[in-house]
């Protein structure tokens, strides 16, 4: 595999999840992260992932907010969470600190 080549993490999610069971939430917001409800072997789960096609997979403030909200949802419904992580890290600096990227 070419480590410099980007890919759509949604493809990985569809391959892991039971056929037709993946439902992405907030697809238009925080595009550097993907959040979805899915089933694996019939069991409901939450899935979080960074999206290598956006910002090279780095997480910005909207993506972090999206992930935090989704993890709260999963906790409320006691859903296990599968994390797909292929990220170079977070985008940091004064501008992002003001946006409370890392809380």
Image (cartoon, rainbow, N blue to C red):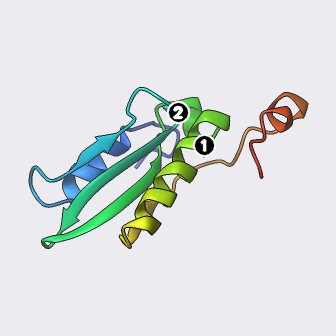
Give yes or no for contact between labels 1 and 2 (Cβ–Cβ under 8 Å).
yes
Residue 67: x %, y % from top left: 53, 49
Residue 43: x %, y % from top left: 19, 73
- Vertical placement of residue 97 versus 35, above or below: above
- Vertical placement of residue 67 versus 38, above or below: above
> Which of these two is toward me, 73 or 84?
73
How crowded is the residue under tag 2: few (<14 C-alpha within 10 Å), some, or many (20+)? many
How crowded is the residue under tag 1: few (<14 C-alpha within 10 Å), some, or many (20+)? some
Residue 9 placement: quadrant: top left
Query: Which residue lies under the disc numbered 1?
Result: 65
Residue 58: x %, y % from top left: 62, 40
Query: Which residue lies under the disc numbered 2?
Result: 30
Residue 94 appears left or right of 91: right
- Vertical placement of residue 85 versus 54, above or below: below
The residue furthest right is 94
Residue 35 appears left or right of 22: right
Residue 70: x %, y % from top left: 46, 52
Q: Residue at x 43, y 66 (%)?
A: 76
């Amino acid at each position: 595999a070419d480590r410099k080549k980007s890919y759509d993490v949604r493809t990985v999610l569809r391959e892991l999840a039971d056929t037709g069971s993946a439902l992405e939430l907030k697809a238009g917001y925080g595009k550097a992260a993907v959040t979805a409800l899915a089933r694996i072997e019939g069991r409901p789960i939450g899935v979080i992932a960074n999206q290598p096609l956006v910002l090279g997979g780095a997480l910005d403030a909207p993506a972090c907010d999206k992930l935090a909200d989704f993890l709260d949802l999963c906790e409320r419904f006691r859903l296990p969470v599968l994390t797909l992580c292929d990220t170079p890290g977070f985008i940091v600096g004064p501008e992002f600190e003001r946006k409370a990227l890392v809380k």
